Amino acid sequence: MHTDDAWGLALVLLITALRRGRVESITFGPIGVRIQEAVQATASAARAWKAEGPGRKEVDVPRIRATINRAFEPEVLDNMTGKLVLWVDDNPANNELAVRALRKFNLEVEQVTSTEAAMAELDKRVFHLVISDMGRGMNMRAGYELLHLIRESGNQVPFFIFAGSDTPGHRREAAARGAQLSTNDMLELVDNVVKYLGEKP
């Protein structure tokens, strides 16, 4: 057996064991380094986000690791590589750590600060996911308005609302308006990015 073949077989066996819960993670070679970097980047983003609000729970690192391990399964990572994410937020600095985490999955992330800029980008390129805040400036429903414009144009791109509020009513309204997710949970956001861009056909 050639060396390359042996390494390939070893990787398949390790990922199979990982999926069956027999090992916690792959921790050798370049893949192990990338997984650990992604775990650290996601944990940092989640901690920063949780620090913004009082009384939020500690970051669930095992949950992060489980999501990252899913993301680095070869087929899932292949599916995500090169896909475009449009992130709309009038305070893009708030999301820098989260954007850095998403880029660990080989995603390309474009950040814009307004509905107008978002629609201009969507006219120029095909995006595979839109993430939007809710309130921008004095407009506390800007996220819904952007979603309406996108759907009115016939674009069915997956749309996630990532905002400070996460009430059941907001989740229901977002779903009724055509969003695939409304959350204030960083880990739920990352989990659904992996689901929609890596695991869905």
Image (cartoon, helix red, strand yellow):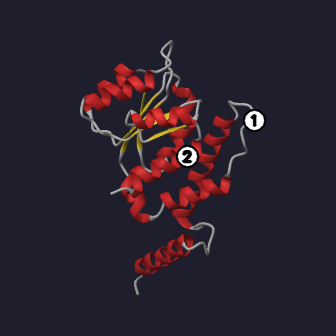
The reply to whether residue 26 is in sight is: yes
Q: Which residue is labeled 2 in the image? A: 188
Residue 94 shows which numbered tag?
none
Q: Tell me if mark 2 has few (under 14), some (14-19) or many (20+) residues whose alpha carbon lies within 10 angstroms of its own.
A: some
Q: Secondary structure at mark 1?
A: loop
Q: Nearer the viewer, residue 181 or 102?
A: 181
158 relative to 61, above or below: above
Cα separation between marks 1 and 2: 18 Å
Residue 81, how many percent across, how many down?
38, 52
Q: Nearer the viewer, residue 186 or 79?
A: 186
Q: Nearer the viewer, residue 80 or 139?
A: 139
Q: Is residue 45 left or right of residue 88?
A: right
First reached walking from the N terminus: tag 1 or tag 2: 1
> In percent of the image, x 60 and y 72: which residue is there?
21
Residue 45, how many percent across, how many down?
61, 40
The reply to whether residue 113 is in sight is: no
Residue 55 shows which numbered tag?
1
> In percent of the image, x 42 and y 64: which residue is there?
74
In the displayed orientation, state which residue is furthest to the top: 138
Q: Quadrant of residue 120?
A: top left
The kind of residue on which mark 2 rests is Glu
Residue 191, how many percent across, how many down?
52, 50
How many numbered callouts? 2
Q: Nearer the viewer, residue 108 or 153?
A: 153
Residues at marks 1 and 2 touching, judged by CB atoms closer than 8 Å: no
Q: Tell me if mark 1 has few (under 14), some (14-19) or many (20+) residues whose alpha carbon lies within 10 angstroms of its own.
A: few
The kind of residue on which mark 1 rests is Gly
